[in-house]
Structure formats: structure tokens, C-alpha cells
């Protein structure tokens, strides 16, 4: 399996003829290919002609309609375990009786991966997709590819004298919504919540927008994206209740910051995990943390809280960890884990988010369970801060067995999963069973 940021992503229709079906189906029947650089994600073995093709014969109309209907979710919704998530992200759900490529499209808000997997050979099916590849692109490039394909299909319909189709209506709505900042904001939140257009409770969206004006737009987007993990779209009122009941007093101005002039790559410029490692290494060097594990007292000091925030697991609360700032010198930190390792990791995530997660002006710093770029950054930052790769590599000395990983996790006071993820990111272990890292 490969995976690098592409220079060019194209979804290409090569028009063919079809003798049956609706006018739009006949007009837009095509050999459709998805190309990432020189790699065709749609490469398919055709048993009829006994050869591999770069493109598959499909309904470009149905694919364009699917892209249009799911545009907001494809652009903004991270991976979740929700039952209907696949219907909005996997091409195999397009339908219409065609054999669609086994390609999944998922975004973390800043970057997107188009993951192509081979299909199994079946006696009743003459087509078998053969590519195993992860195409990683910036989210804006995914937008351009989807837009370009849908526009080509709309133009083909126009050239054939076909108008007023469902695609025309849906795509016209999407274009209008994207041009209207207020409507675009609502559609983005709706997608982050995991809903199709017009399916979310309007009052929930209103609440998230109102809370964003106080706590920060990016922060409330993270909260919205976490809904699929918990089933709860939380409000500012709920956050304050949890902070009061389970939070620890914090001093935001005493939290560690990187010194002026310490460079950091812009959000989305590189994979989230690399950016997390970059900033964690810079902080370790600035604070002269050395190679020894970070003590609870030192970690708490960097987060602007007392050490008891880690030790007092009886005050675990909420669906996720967060810091809620009431002023420069006053705030609350809530940790949700009941275990010492988990609480250390959550606190390190909040340190990272304050340094490079949001825009620096947000009053809420959420460390949720969503799959957004910001959360991936936080997790990578926390892992590198608590368990720096170079030191871990020296300790393991090439032994990546389960026992060695457990021993290292105990030494650095992190979970074995955190150690495995660090090793996956640095290509010491295969990423299978860990999840896509992009």
C-alpha cells in the first residue's frame, strides 16, 4: 500500500454509448476513472476481455448525483462508527446495478484519503478491482476533483439537451449553499454531526453556532464532530456544568507556550501526526525535558493545573477531556479517563492544543474522540511529548515485540496503543489494525 500527498487528483469520464435506461443514464454512460498522479484507483480486471482496464464502465450520472448529495459530508465528516457513515463515503453504495470500485473517501477537515482496496473474484461478476492504495490529498484538492467531475456531467447533459434532472437541482443547491457563508456554516456543522442535508435538528445547529461565538468556532466544530462517538451534541451550558462538577481549577496564563519565533508548520501543511511531533519536539527542547519520562508534577505545571488533576481519578467527568478558560488567570480542566496513563495523555493533548491546535483565541480546548485533523495533531503531540520517538527507539533497540512495547509503555507511563501508534507513524510497524494516518 502506498500513500503520499498528490500533485493532481482527477475523476475522468470517457463517454460511451448505452442503448437502454433513462435519458440521463444513456447520455452519461462512461468509462470512469479516478486518477491519483500516475495511479488509477479504478484499475479493474475485466474477465470478458481478459485484461486490466484503467477505467470501469459506469453511470457517470449516478456517481455525480452521489457526489452532489454527499458533498458536505465528504468534505467535512471524519470517520465514525455510525451505521449510515458508509453510505456517504463508500462508492460501493452508489447503486444502480453497477459494479462500483471499492473506494472509500474520508476527510479530517484539512486532508482527505481516497482508499482503494481490491475486490474478491466472484463467478457471477466479470469485473474485479485490483488496486490496493491510499491516495492522500489536501481537502481543497478533493473539492476541485469532485466539482470538476460533477460539472463535466452537467455539461454533458446540457450538450444532449437534457435539463431539470435531480442532479441539476441538488448540485444547484450545493453551489448556492457554498456561496452563502451563513448557509455554508450550517451545512458544515450538519455534516460534522453526521447528518445528510436538512436532517439535523435546526435548534441543535443554532445552539452550536451561538456557543461558537463565545467559545470559538473551531472548538465547537470539534464538539460537533464528536457527536457520532457519544450520541450527544453538547452545548456550552453542559460544558460549564461538567467543568463545575468535575473540573480542576487552572491558570491558562501559566500554561506553557512556545517562545516567540519558534516556527510551526501551518495547519494542514503536513500530516497531523508529523505536525504534532514537530511541535512536541520543539517544546521538549525549549523546556529542556531531556530523555527521562515527564513526571506528573512537571506535566501538570505545563498545563497550568495542580498535580492532583492527574492523581484524582475519582473526578473523571464528561464525554471527553477539555479546558474551559474563563479568563487569563482562571479556568477549569476536565479529564475524562479513570486511569493515570489516560489522564496524563489527555492533559498532554490539552497542552498541545493550547500550543498549536486552535487559533489561540478560543476559550474552549476540546480533546475529543473524533477523527479530525486537530484531534490527530493532539494525539501525536501528546505521544511524542510523553514518549519521544528517538528515546523510545533507543530503548526498544529493534525489539518491537508485544512484551517490549508493554515494557516501554510502562516506562513512559503511556498506553501500549500510544507506543504502537508512534511506531506505526515512524514505519517501524505496519499500520494495519491501527487506522489510517494522514
Image: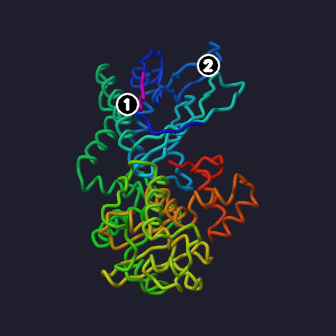
Mark 2 — residue? Answer: 46
Q: Give me the residue at 43% from left, 40% from top.
A: 137
Q: Nearer the viewer, residue 143 or 381?
A: 381
Mark 1 — residue? Answer: 149
Q: Secondary structure at mark 1?
A: helix
Q: Is residue 128 left or right of residue 76?
A: right
Residue 11 shown in magenta: yes
Q: Give me the residue at 24% from left, 53% from top.
A: 181
Classify mark 2: residues with Cα within 10 Å, few (<14), some (14-19) or many (20+): some
Q: Position of residue 398 (x, y in %)?
A: 70, 52
The answer to the question of whether label 2 and label 1 lie on touching residues, with beta carbons closer than 8 A, is no
Q: Nearer the viewer, residue 340 or 27?
A: 340
Q: Position of residue 303 (x, y in %)?
A: 44, 76
Q: Quadrant of residue 112?
A: top left
Against 266, residue 381 (above or below) is below
Residue 37 shown in magenta: no
The quadrant of the rendering that contains the N terminus is: top right
Q: Position of residue 243 (x, y in %)?
A: 44, 82
Question: Magenta segment, which residues?
Answer: 8-13
Dot 2 or dot 1, earlier in sequence: 2
Main SS, magenta residues: strand
Q: Is residue 362 left or right of residue 394?
A: left
Against 279, residue 351 (above or below) is below
Amino acid at each position: 500500500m502506498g500513500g503520499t500527498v498528490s500533485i493532481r487528483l482527477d475523476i475522468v469520464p470517457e463517454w460511451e454509448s448505452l442503448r437502454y435506461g433513462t435519458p440521463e443514464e444513456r447520455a452519461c454512460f462512461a468509462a470512469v476513472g479516478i486518477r491519483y498522479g500516475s495511479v488509477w484507483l479504478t484499475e479493474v480486471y475485466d474477465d470478458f476481455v481478459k485484461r486490466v482496464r484503467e477505467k470501469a464502465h459506469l453511470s457517470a450520472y449516478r456517481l455525480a448525483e452521489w457526489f452532489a448529495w454527499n458533498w458536505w459530508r465528504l468534505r467535512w465528516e471524519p470517520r465514525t462508527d455510525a451505521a449510515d457513515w458508509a453510505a456517504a463515503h463508500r462508492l460501493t453504495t452508489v447503486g444502480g446495478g453497477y459494479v462500483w470500485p471499492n473506494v472509500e473517501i474520508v476527510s479530517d477537515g484539512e486532508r482527505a484519503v481516497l482508499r482503494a482496496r481490491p475486490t474478491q473474484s466472484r463467478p457471477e461478476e466479470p469485473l474485479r478491482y485490483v488496486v490496493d492504495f491510499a491516495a492522500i490529498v489536501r481537502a481543497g484538492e478533493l473539492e476541485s476533483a469532485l466539482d470538476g467531475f460533477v460539472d463535466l456531467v452537467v455539461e454533458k447533459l446540457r450538450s444532449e439537451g437534457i435539463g431539470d434532472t435531480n442532479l441539476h437541482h441538488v448540485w444547484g443547491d450545493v453551489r448556492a449553499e457554498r456561496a452563502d457563508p451563513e448557509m455554508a456554516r450550517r451545512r458544515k456543522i450538519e455534516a460534522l454531526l453526521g447528518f445528510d442535508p436538512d436532517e439535523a435538528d435546526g435548534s441543535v445547529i443554532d445552539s452550536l453556532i451561538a456557543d461558537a461565538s463565545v467559545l470559538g468556532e473551531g472548538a465547537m466544530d470539534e464538539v460537533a464532530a464528536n457527536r457520532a462517538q457519544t450520541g450527544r451534541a453538547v452545548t456550552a451550558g453542559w460544558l460549564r456544568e461538567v467543568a463545575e462538577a468535575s473540573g480542576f481549577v487552572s491558570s491558562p496564563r501559566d500554561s506553557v507556550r512556545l517562545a516567540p519565533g519558534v516556527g510551526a508548520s501551518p495547519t494542514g501543511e503536513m500530516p497531523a501526526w508529523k505536525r504534532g511531533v514537530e511541535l512536541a519536539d520543539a517544546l521538549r527542547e525549549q523546556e529542556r525535558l531531556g530523555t527521562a519520562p515527564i513526571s506528573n508534577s512537571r506535566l501538570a505545571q505545563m498545563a497550568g493545573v495542580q498535580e492532583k488533576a492527574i492523581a484524582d481519578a475519582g473526578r473523571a467527568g464528561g464525554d471527553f477531556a477539555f479546558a474551559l478558560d474563563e479568563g487569563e488567570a482562571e479556568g477549569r480542566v476536565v479529564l475524562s479517563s479513570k486511569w493515570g496513563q489516560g489522564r496524563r495523555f489527555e492533559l498532554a493533548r490539552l497542552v498541545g492544543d493550547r500550543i498549536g491546535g486552535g487559533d489561540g483565541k478560543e476559550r474552549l480546548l476540546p480533546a475529543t474522540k473524533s477523527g479530525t485533523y486537530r484531534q490527530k495533531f493532539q494525539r501525536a503531540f501528546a505521544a511524542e511529548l510523553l514518549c519521544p520517538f528517538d528515546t523510545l527507539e533507543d530503548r526498544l533497540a529493534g525489539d518491537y515485540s508485544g512484551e517490549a512495547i508493554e515494557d516501554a509503555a510502562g516506562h513512559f507511563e503511556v498506553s501500549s496503543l500510544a507506543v504502537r501508534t508512534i511506531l506505526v507513524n515512524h514505519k517501524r510497524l505496519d499500520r494495519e489494525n491501527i487506522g489510517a494516518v494522514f
